[in-house]
Image (cartoon, grey):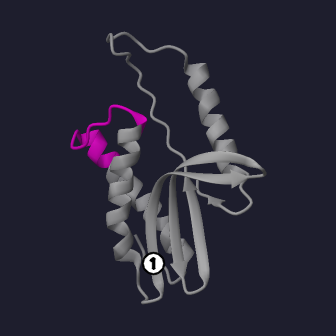
Amino acid sequence: MELNSNFEKRLRDSISFAWMIFSKKVGAGVLSINKEASMQLHYAHILSQVLPLIILDANESAHVELETGVSVEGSYREIDLILLGCKGDDNHKISIEMKCYKTKASSGKNRGATDIFMKDVYIDLSNSLFRPTIKSYL
């Protein structure tokens, strides 16, 4: 990961870098993910450990919030993770929506209802994309 001089770019790059680490650990069996909440928690932990490495100025700070509620156009929305970054008076909010879909049910048989799962994915993405005050990262 290149350390860009632009703070917001570094925040976005840290999301991708943390995801790369997370996915490699899950793929190698180092992290076990059994549901969406554990995925969010493990990823947020990795991202939280990456963030101090991208802070290059005394007036910069960043942290992650899990399951944060925000008001969007009069409706309450819950965001899986929000990366909050500050540089001086500039505040950056990047929403991160995560989905975990198991291909096997607890019975060991193939899981059905992929259309319902995809509907939930599209709803969450829609909620992320149309925020007047929160920038989305896909």
Give the extent of the magenta segment: 23-36
> Is the residue 87 above or below the residue 92 in the image?
below
Extreme left residue here?
A: 30
> Which residue in the protein does label 1 denote?
61
Confirm whether the magenta stretch covers residue 106. Answer: no
Quarter where residue 49 is shown: bottom left
Image label count: 1
Q: Residue at x 21, y 43 (%)?
A: 30
Extreme bottom residue here?
A: 58
Q: Residue at x 42, y 36 (%)?
A: 36
> Is the residue 11 above or below the residue 98 in the image?
below
Q: Nearer the viewer, residue 100 or 64?
A: 64
Query: Dot 1, crowdedness within 10 Å: few (<14), some or many (≥20)?
Result: some
- Say what amino acid the circle numbered 1 marks: Ser
Q: Residue at x 74, y 60 (%)?
A: 132
Position in image of residue 110 (x %, y %): 41, 12
Q: Residue at x 50, y 84 (%)?
A: 5
Q: Is residue 9 left or right of residue 66?
A: right
**Quadrant (top left, top right, bottom left, bottom right) of the N terminus:** bottom left
Callout 1 secondary element: strand
Position in image of residue 113 (x %, y %): 55, 16
> Is the residue 104 above or below the residue 97 in the image?
above
Q: Nearer the viewer, residue 129 or 41?
A: 41
Quarter where residue 39 is shown: top left
Position in image of residue 64 (x %, y %): 44, 61
> Is the residue 107 above or below the residue 52 in the image?
above
Position in image of residue 95 (x %, y %): 57, 56
Confirm whether the magenta stretch covers residue 34. Answer: yes
